[in-house]
Image (cartoon, rainbow, N blue to C red):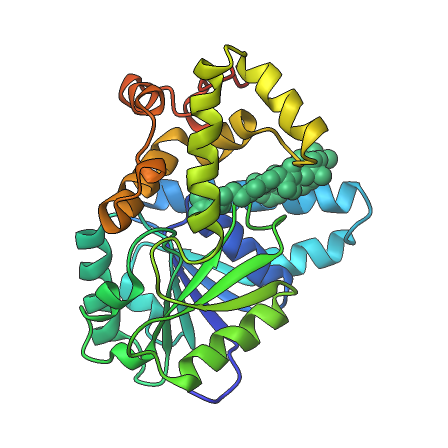
Amino acid sequence: MNAAVQRIGVVGLGAMGAGIAQVAIEAGFDVVGREVSAELGEAARDRIEHFLARKAEKGERTRDEADAALARLRTTVELTDLADCDLVIEAIVEELAAKRALFAELDRLCRADAVLATNTSALSVTELAAATRTPERVVGMHFFNPAPLMPLVEVVRAELSSDVAVATALEVVERLGKVAVPCHDTPGFVVNRVLIPLLNDCVRVLDEARVTPEALDTAMTNGAGWPMGPCTLLDLVGIDVHVHASEALYEKLREPRLAPPPRLVAMRNAGLLGRKSGRGFYSHGA
Ligand code: CAA
């Protein structure tokens, strides 16, 4: 597990997985990205190509650098194509059973010296690692949305993670040009343990102070220096993703502020998921 990582597998190429794949190819890693269908793999490649092209247009990268980065990305529908990766980062749906099944499969097919990482934001890394026969090689690598723009990666040590696996993840984060914060496997790790109850408070304040989402966002950007207001941020993260993470933390810690506000649950149930569905607190695009 000491050898320098060169090839990274990313499983799940949704908003987070595609962002992680983009960061990795831009940093010079070879990436094998796995999606369940060729169409979803193509969609992720198009998304990455779009953002790399924007960087070239804006002079942040040369056209050749953008092309070379894209050439380092291979997409596949076969999990077995990840067999020769040095590190695999899982970014599939936030469901424990689905992730555990995937980790058991990755454990069987990946090289014995490969590190297996999860991008989970609210599930227990230790519980995922327990689905493998080699829990010592499992760690958390928690990126933030949008992954290409947010510097932080929480490197999560599960109960049985080895020092070598943690060190490998930390080294990769540095080579990605990101900022690592190592932490232990506690519910919500560092940022979500703070941010989730805070965003829930923000939503409760909407009704308590009788302000609009626009007014709340104006208050928090101008009064607290947030780069985007809480309602804009919830629309970016996804109302469903936030509610799910909030429920997962509430289940583990039972603090009232961690329970998702009914207003958010109703939005989730109505399909008002934010940017991804075109409507959340705000309307998005066509
Ligand atoms: N992927 C890749 N590139 C992207 C992108 C994406 N999703 N979104 C935008 N970009 C690129 C675009 O090319 C864009 O340039 P153009 O618009 O000229 O094409 C460029 O990045 C800059 O984008 P912005 O102008 O929107 O950037 P900004 O300076 O306004 O900053 C921001 C945007 C970094 C997101 C900033 O608003 C911010 O820090 N917001 C807070 C985000 C945050 O808190 N995230 C954490 C969410 S919680 C979480 O992730 C935890 C969890 O587990 C759920």
* Residue 94 visible: no
Residue depicted at 60% across the width and 28% down the height: 229
Residue 129 location, x and y as percent?
25, 70
What residue is shown at x 29% (from left), y 54% (from top)? 123
Q: Is residue 148 left or right of residue 21?
A: right
Q: Is residue 59 visible?
A: yes
Q: Which one is in front, 214 or 87? A: 214
Please identify the quarter of the rendering in which residue 65 is found.
Answer: bottom right
Above or below, 235 relative to 149? above
Q: Nearer the viewer, residue 21 or 168?
A: 168
Considering the image in quadrants, where does the N terminus appear? bottom left
Residue pushed farthest bottom?
Answer: 2
Q: Position of residue 233 (x, y in %)?
A: 53, 32
Observer-nearest of 201 and 239: 201
Residue 77 occupies quadrant: bottom left
**How many numbered discs, if any?**
0
Residue at the (44%, 48%) spot, across then down? 192
Q: Is residue 31 left or right of residue 158?
A: right
- Look at the picture and state if 10 lies above or below 206: below
Q: Is 108 positioned to the left or the right of 122 in the image?
A: left
Taking the image as four quarters, which one is ligand 1 found in? top right
Nearer the observer, 82 or 214: 214
The percent position of residue 60, horizontal first and vertical second, equals 79, 50
Residue at 48%, 43% in the rendered image: 195
Query: Image height check: is 104 above or below 232?
Result: below
In x, y percent, where is residue 138?
33, 73
The residue positioned farthest toward the right in the image shown? 59
Q: Is residue 32 above or below residue 39?
A: below
